[in-house]
Image: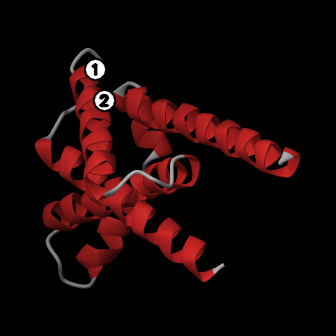
């Protein structure tokens, strides 16, 4: 019993650390954010070297990066509340992501997009599925 409480405490602490890191990335002003997330331009440059248009590559890389960024969200939610099904997690992720997009309207230079909400929600659902797979395998 004590070991489970200790594990839950650590999961909550890690989830909070993840959320703080996420907030750091999504709430930085655009100029500073580009130095943190500059990998999007680098990867898009590599893809354009292979023949993809630079702008299309950047959009695709950013979409995938948003998915990856929210995978831990879904995994943590599942680990902390394993009884939640797919739809409540999808709703939680979509509402959280929507709130981020609305708040970004207040940050100079930040651009909001519905595609970010879609990608973030997909990422959270992927995290949920991955966490379920690992939990059922163990």
Q: Most extreme residue toward the right, as rendered?
A: 2
Identity of the residue drawn at 24% across and 74% down: 48
Q: In this view, does 113 lie above or below 135?
A: above
Residue marked by disc 2: 100
Residue marked by disc 1: 103
Identity of the residue drawn at 25% across and 34% down: 95
Q: Can residue 100 be seen in this view?
A: yes
Which residue is nearer to you in this view: 42 or 28? 28
Q: Is residue 110 visible?
A: no
The answer to which quarter of the image holds residue 65 is bottom left
Q: In this view, does 85 lie above or below 15?
A: below
Task: Identify the secondary structure beneath mark 2.
Answer: helix
| Disc 1 residue crowd, few under 14, some 14–19, many 20+, Cα 10 Å | some
The answer to which quarter of the image holds residue 101 is top left
Which residue is nearer to you in this view: 49 or 67? 67
Contact, CB < 8 Å: mark 2 with mark 1? yes
Q: Position of residue 51 (x, y in %)?
A: 18, 83
Identity of the residue drawn at 40% across and 41% down: 34
Which residue is nearer to you in this view: 138 or 116? 138
Q: Where is residue 59 in the image (x, y as percent from the top left)?
A: 19, 58
Task: Identify the secondary structure beneath mark 1.
Answer: helix
| Disc 2 residue crowd, few under 14, some 14–19, many 20+, Cα 10 Å | some
- 101 left or right of 136 in image: left
Q: Distance between the residues labelled 2 and 1?
A: 5 Å
Q: Position of residue 66 (x, y in %)?
A: 33, 53
Picture disc at residue 46: none
Q: Is residue 89 above or below residue 27?
A: below
């Amino acid at each position: 019993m004590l070991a489970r409480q200790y594990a839950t405490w650590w999961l909550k602490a890690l989830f909070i650390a993840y959320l703080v890191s996420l907030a750091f990335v999504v709430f930085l002003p655009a100029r500073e954010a580009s130095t943190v997330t500059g990998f999007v331009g680098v990867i898009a440059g590599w893809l354009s070297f292979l023949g993809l248009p630079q702008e299309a590559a950047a959009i695709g890389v950013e979409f995938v990066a948003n998915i990856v960024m929210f995978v831990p969200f879904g995994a943590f939610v599942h680990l902390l509340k394993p009884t939640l099904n797919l739809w409540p997690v999808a709703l939680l992720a979509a509402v959280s992501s929507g709130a981020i997009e609305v708040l970004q309207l207040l940050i100079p230079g930040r651009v909001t997009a519905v595609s970010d909400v879609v990608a973030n929600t997909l990422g959270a659902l992927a995290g949920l599925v991955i966490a379920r797979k690992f939990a059922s395998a163990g």
